[in-house]
Structure formats: C-alpha cells, structure tokens
C-alpha cells in the first residue's frame, strides 16, 4: 500500500531563514504525483505545490520549492525567507490510483511549523 | 479562484442525532471528496464522488453516507452521530482534467463536536 511519512511533528525557524520540511513516500507505481498543502489555524487546506513523477525539474512556486529525489523517494518542501504568516501545519500528499481509473490523495500526518520573529 | 464552501464552521450535536454536512463548489468540478482530520492521523478519506449520483467508499466509510444530487453539491450524512465522530470534516473538489487535475481544493472545514 502507498504511504506518506512526515517524520517531523514540529519545526521551528527564525523569520527570514529557510526551512526544509521532510516527506518520504512509498509506492510501486511509476506514475504518481506529490502535493504539499498548508493548513493555517483557520483550518482551510491551501494547495502550495505539485510535482509529477516524470517532471525532470524540481517544482517551484514563489518562495516554495520541492526538493524531489526520486531514488530516495523523498519530496521535501523548502520554504525560503520564512515569514510569520508561514506558521501553520504542512501536509505532504501523494496521488494513488484506484481501480476504475479513479484516484485519491493519501496524506501524511503533517508537520507543524512555527516561525519566530 | 476555486471556491469550496461548507455549511457550518462549528457544529455541536448530541449522540444519536442525524447530522448533515453540506459542501458546495462553484468551479464545475467533476470530483468531490469528504475527509476527516484527527491529530496525528492526517486526513482520511471517508467518501468520494466522480459524478452526480455516484459515490465510492474511501478508507473509513463506516457510520457515514453521502449524497450527490447536483454536480456542485456533496453532502455528508452521519445517520446516528457518536462521540467518536467528533472531528474536523473537510470537503474538497478537483477537476480531474489535465496534469494538475488531481489537485484538490478544500473548503474551510467543519469542526463537529458530538456530546
């Protein structure tokens, strides 16, 4: 079965510094997609970034980048120049294909990031 | 922008009550999903739907049912609420089209407390 592991329950970072949130995944599929979501205290899940398994370049979206290491099955999120508003829960997720051509997302347990001034 | 709305941000219900959680999306998305979120467990899929009147069980469907009578609306039903269904419930939708079609967009969540 496919699985997402986030080993850091909590992380602290100083404002303006970069931080890496770890994510490893387990799948036997050749084609898959990896996602990162941010969940502020308000509760809404906000899509941040996507990486396809066949994408040769690491995905980037503004201050977010995904350090994709296929051989190690890791998809770490890097946030550059942290801001106070980055304090939130961060979830890594992977697309899982189901019978019938459907697909769903599998989520990790999440990492709580606290940005200090 | 994709907009997913949920009928309530907070709900308090009593054990045995029938509970309806409503979700509406305005982007004509084909796919809709219901998750529950509990500390340390991440998000777990309850039910999903890929078309009107169509539903599929997720990983934890027991104690829940769903209804999708219109494309934009996906309802989660707790037939007889129990205390172990106290949780945060999140609805999501996705277009299912193109390379990013599996990207799910979420509503603000409903925090349900069952007493």
Image: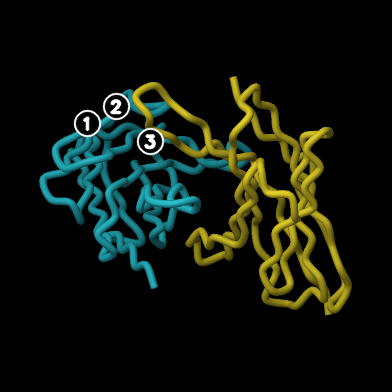
Q: Position of residue B85 (x, y in %)?
A: 38, 35
Q: Does A15 appear above or below B18? A: below
Identify which residue is drawn at 75% across, 55% down: A57
Residues at marks 2 and 3 touching, judged by CB atoms closer than 8 Å: yes
Judging from the image, what secondary structure is the residue with disc 2 in? loop
The foreground one among B42 and B86 is: B42
From the image, state the color of chain A. yellow
Hey, which residue is sitting farthest left in the picture?
Answer: B69
Secondary structure at numbered mark 3: helix
Q: Chain letter for cyan?
A: B
Within 10 Å of disc 2 (Cα), the crowding (few <14, some 14-19, many 20+) is few
Where disc 1 sits, the SS reads loop
Q: Are both tags, 2 and 3, on one chain? A: yes
When asked about the image quadrant of residue A104, the answer is: top left
Q: How far is the residue under mark 2 from the one under mark 3?
A: 9 Å
Q: Are marks 1 and 2 in contact (CB under 8 Å)?
A: yes
Residue A16 relative to residue B59: left or right? right
Say whether residue B89 is left or right of residue A51.
left
The residue carrying mark 1 is B80
Instruction: Find the distance from the CA under tag 1 to the CA under tag 2.
Output: 8 Å
**A32, above or below B113, in the image:** above
Dot 1: few (<14), some (14–19), or many (≥20) neighbours within 10 Å? some
Q: Which residue is mark 2?
A: B63
Quarter the N terminus of chain A occupies: top right
Quick check: A5 above or below B87? above
Q: Chain of mark 1?
A: B
- Residue at 27 percent of width and 39 percent of height: B50
Dot 1 and dot 2 within a common chain: yes
The answer to whether residue A42 is left or right of residue A87 is left
Residue B85's disc number: 3
Q: Chain of mark 2?
A: B
């Amino acid at each position: 079965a496919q699985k997402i592991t986030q080993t850091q329950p909590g992380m602290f970072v100083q404002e303006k510094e970069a931080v890496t949130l770890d994510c490893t995944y387990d799948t036997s599929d050749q084609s898959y997609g990896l996602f990162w979501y941010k969940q502020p205290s308000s509760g809404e899940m906000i899509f941040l970034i996507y990486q396809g398994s066949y994408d040769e370049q690491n995905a980037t979206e503004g201050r977010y980048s995904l350090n994709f290491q296929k051989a190690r099955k890791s998809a770490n999120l890097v946030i550059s120049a942290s801001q106070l508003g980055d304090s939130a829960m961060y979830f890594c997720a992977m697309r899982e294909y189901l019978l019938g051509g459907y697909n769903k997302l599998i989520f990790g347990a999440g990492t709580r990031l606290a940005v200090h001034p | 922008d994709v907009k997913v709305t949920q009928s309530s941000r907070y709900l308090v219900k009593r054990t045995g009550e029938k509970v309806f959680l409503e979700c509406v999306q305005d982007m004509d998305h084909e796919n809709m999903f219901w998750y529950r979120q509990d500390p340390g467990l991440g998000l777990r899929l309850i039910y999903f739907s890929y078309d009107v009147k169509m539903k599929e069980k997720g990983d934890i469907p027991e104690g829940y049912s769903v209804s999708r009578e219109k494309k934009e609306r996906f309802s989660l039903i707790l037939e007889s609420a129990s205390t172990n269904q106290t949780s945060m419930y999140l609805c999501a939708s996705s277009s299912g089209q193109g390379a990013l079609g599996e990207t799910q967009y979420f509503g603000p969540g409903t925090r349900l407390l069952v007493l």
